[in-house]
Amino acid sequence: MRRIFWRGPPGSLGFPLKRLRVINAMKADTPPPHKNRWSWRSQAFRGIVYQALALAVIAFVAWFLAHNTLLNMRERGIQSGFDFMLQSAGFDIGESLYPFDSEESYLSAFLVGVSNTLRVAVVGIVLSTLLGTLLGVGRFSRNALVRGLCVSYVEAFRNIPVLLQLLMWYVILTEVLPSSDAAWKLGDFFLSKGGLNFPIPVWAVGQLWAAIGLGLGVVGVLLYRRWARRQFEATGRLRSAFWVPVVILIASSLAGWALGGAPTELNRPIRGEFSIEHGGALTPEFLAVLIGLTLYTAAFIAEVVRGGIASVPRGQGEAASALGLSHQQEMRLVMLPQALRVIIPPLTNQYLNLTKNSSLAVAIGYPDVVSIANTALNQTGRAVECISIVMLVYLTTSLGTSLLMGWYNSRSAIKER
Amino acid sequence: MNATTFQPIPARPAPVNTEGPVAWVKSNLMGDWKTTLSTVLIGAVLLWYVPQIINWAFITASWAPRYEACSAEGVGACWGVITEKYRIILFGRYPYEEQWRPLIATTLLTGLLVASCMRRFWHLWLPLMWLAVLTIFFALMYGNFGGLTKVETDRWGGLPLTILLSSLSLVLCFPIALVVALGRRSKLPAIRSFCTIYVELIRGVPLISVLFMASFMFPLFMPQGTQIDVLLRVLVGITLFAAAYMAEVIRGGLQAIPKGQVEAAATLGLSYWQTQRMIVLPQALAMVVPGIMNNFISTFKDTSLVTIVSLYELTGALKLGINSDANWRPFIIEGYFFIALIYFVFCFSMSRYSRWVEKQVNKSKLR
Amino acid sequence: MRISTVKTLAAIAAAICTLAALPAHAGKTLDGIKAKGMVTCGVNTGLAGFGAADSAGKWSGLDVDVCRAIAAATLGDAEKVKYVPLNAQQRFTALQSGEIDVLSRNTTFTLTRDASLGLHDTVVTYYDGQGFMVPVKSKLKSAKQLKGQTVCVQSGTTTEKNLTDYSKANGLAIKPVVFEQLEAAENAYFTGRCIAYTTDASGLASTRNKVAKVPADHVILPELISKEPLGPMVRRGDDEWFAVVKWVIYGLIEAEEYGITQGNVDSLKTSSTDPVVKRILGTGEDSGKLLGLDKDWMARAIKATGNYGEIFERNVGPKSALGLPRGLNNQWNKGGLMYAYPVR
């Protein structure tokens, strides 16, 4: 028997009068009765009942878990609370963006872990987007060899688990690279089992001025883009979207650097007794994580980009040619905006995946936040607290990335009713 | 009257052949100067490196299961590590003499998976077959009856464990994901918020923290004395994780259905569940088949992370086999290649199958 | 929703919750073991001499033998042990959560572990210290030469903290490369990623002799930078089980002191006249009853694994692959620190 939403005109009882012996209610001078909210036939009532049941079940489960945990912890004398965060950490961290001393608190140690995670995540996102876009666009190339290479790359790297890839890259890097005394040298760059050592500029006023110049350059680029868009809408002439902004950024940074005294002093790495000393260093752990994550995620991004470009109906390209648009104009004005709409949500997913996959770096010795949490967990025994901190860090990063990409997505979305 | 003789005009040249290998090479590899240049460069690189790789991997490789043969001069890849250790890699810590049991069980389950993909097996008795094969699988692996010795679940490892975890979690996560996706689009605020919180929470954290919580901290959440199998805990963790991602994929499909479909269904007098079952879900699921298959492949690969909780699937079993034996240590990379090949075979077949399904479903959209 | 609806729903939810109040019962580990018929023992994933499985899945090692002795004493059969391999991070949560009954995984006893993890240290089965291992070709002679160098270490161990303390005290600015798994740390050292590998000296010997391709290419530096008393740990909240584990180990040590070996335990049971021996083997007083076991508890344990000296010799002694001297682990009357409390 078919159930239907409502059997009768709105405002009525909803069912034929002869089912209900409330003859008084149908007198013409009394107002129509309230919609019957306590009958199972009312959708609103059913909704309330379902929600109440769901809430009761969830509340019970949550209470059950919390009660057991507290009981078990009290019985076994396991201490809880976040007060351990202010205690001195007592362990060193192998690599970090800024110096970390073992006397600093656990909170500082966690912050170092977060900075390490963000470091590999941000660089990985940038590199994998570049590589993935190249591969995705390469799938539509006229050259069959290029097409074949892109396909093989994507298939090869998508179908192997990321943990396995990270482990393989680490083994390759530590086996293939020479030890520090026989490091490969290219100018001031050294590549060995100890990592990649490169010269870094010694921080002076000039770099600060260069940074200021870069900031001004970003403002300049935004102004240029506004001007270019207004020019396009007025005259229909497309301005360069890539080269001019790049030139503006480089020029402003150079100007700032020159104004600051043009410092050229570099901290060069030199061969020490057992390893390369001084200079900046990227450890093999960081390199392995970066290479592994970049190559893996690039394969997925290539598929996303390919899907985006393929989702644009073929008629759009044909219509663009019919209108006489050049290949570049067709790409920029017709294909890319429509493709971007389809690309952005799965691309966000891939960025989140990359950030979360960086948690596997703990298997190869890179001190990201999971690794630091593991150490803290073992030294203080606060398992629940440490795990919840890790989950909180990843949740915040994910939510932040989702919000950012969601804002970008809504800007490029199709406005529907 | 003068008869004019017919003067044929000279024959025009034959049309350019656009079929055949020569034409294909010309259009695909040498279309214009840029294409020709890239062909030459890539061809040169390939011709230089590919013979070297083939030489290392096959011609000078050593297949004998003795490490002295591998350490000899001029030997390339050492596939002897596979021929020597393949049983511990494929079956983990399962007792050596009983390894015929996981072999049969895995073959049955893989056969069933392959059969479920083919149209000719899509009958009503397929779910019954699934139940039967799963029962046989567990009975064979666990034993403890009919002369088979008992083998605890923490001894299960290698390929059987990978296939069991992936197939069970995928089968179980799909209904959960459907309910959560529909719940997320529901008008009831409590259900919608709960589903949203669940999906966002699980999607925001990495799998290893979920596995760590499920495997090592779960007993802390239970009343004292309850003993839940490690395999079950890990399975629950992976299922909940996969369900959150699947729910998002399905929700994408649901979002893409025009509102008019639901309104038309209401006009016809269909209830909510009838609308979902007959109108919305068939269209939505057909639209997101690539996403669903992608999720299947990801879950299969994510089972490699259970090494973290001391269940020895392929990667963990390899490290177990090689780390206790110093002589084979330098050849671990060949072991990694072997495991990568296994994963590649499975995942590649799944992705090709997904392409086929996509084509079947989109037959109406082909030009 | 109307206020009255909210109140009704809240009342329903509260009623359901109170109905499901759970009784709090203290689980007895020993009862659980007897019911299951198995002792669940947390061991190392693969440290030769202490806890390692061979390719057929058979476990052996000093810590493994302690587990077998406990199983023999409580259940009567040394093979009724379920071994759960744990790495350094998982071991404490596994013990706290009840997944394992005893953690026999070369774990150092420290104040933090005793006081804040909800665990109890039982008896030291191996007195150790932390050292460094370096390749011979690095020509390092002392740990103090490791200024600014990379050292591979396993995460979540006292090793990490000791390394930091030593580095700070001597101004060495050592850069640790921290791995979650023992095998990964060893691998990194052997491929040359780090110049040194640090762990307990017994672990260094085990790694050098069983894992290194050419043991002679590696040398253990002379400095011992910390005290590492290793032994099994149990959960808090079950004094009975704590006593059982403690006294099984004391029994093994005292058995060596009084000359009871795996070979002569049967004959000594019937023929010995020494009251101490008779107490240990249960032919005199029944000490097992006070622990909740039967009177042959120690006899079975010694028969299954031998006394402490035999366990030591078999797994890590001078004639074994690790070749470690008794040193501090000798009996108290022979110059070592093994001083068993009297089993009486």
Image (tube, rainbow, N blue to C red):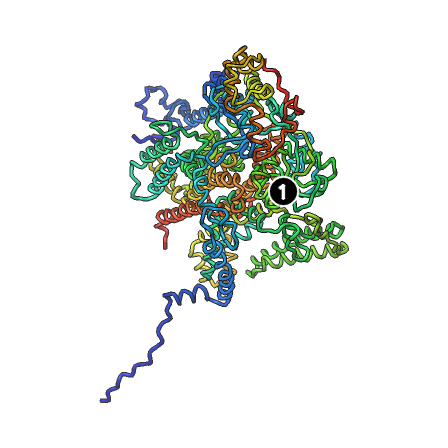
Quarter-wise, where is residue C273 in the image? top right
For residue C164, side relative to residue C48 (left or right): right
Q: Is residue C219 above or below residue C316?
A: below
Q: Which residue type carries mark 1?
A: His
Tell which residue pokes out farthest to the right in this image. A261
Quadrant of the rendered structure where residue B9 is?
bottom left
Closer-to-camera residue (B99/B249): B99
Q: Farthest residue to the bottom: give it.
A: B1
Residue found at the very far top of the displayed protein: C285
- The spot of residue A248 in percent (x, y) is 66, 57
Quickly name the residue at label 1.
Answer: C218
Q: Quadrant of residue C333?
A: top right
Left or right of B159, for residue C234? right
Q: Is residue A410 visible?
A: no
User: At which x and y percent is residue B225?
Assistant: 49, 20
- Check disc 1: other Cα within 10 Å, few if <14, some if 14-19, many if 20+: some
Residue that extends furthest to the left in the rendered view of this protein: B1
User: Which quadrant holds the C terminus of chain C?
Assistant: top right
Secondary structure under the numbered disc 1 in the rendered image: strand
Of residue B262 and residue C249, the one placed in the foreground of this image is: C249
Chain at numbered mark 1? C
Residue situated in front as seen by the camera: B182 or A85 = A85
Residue at image position (33%, 20%) is A23
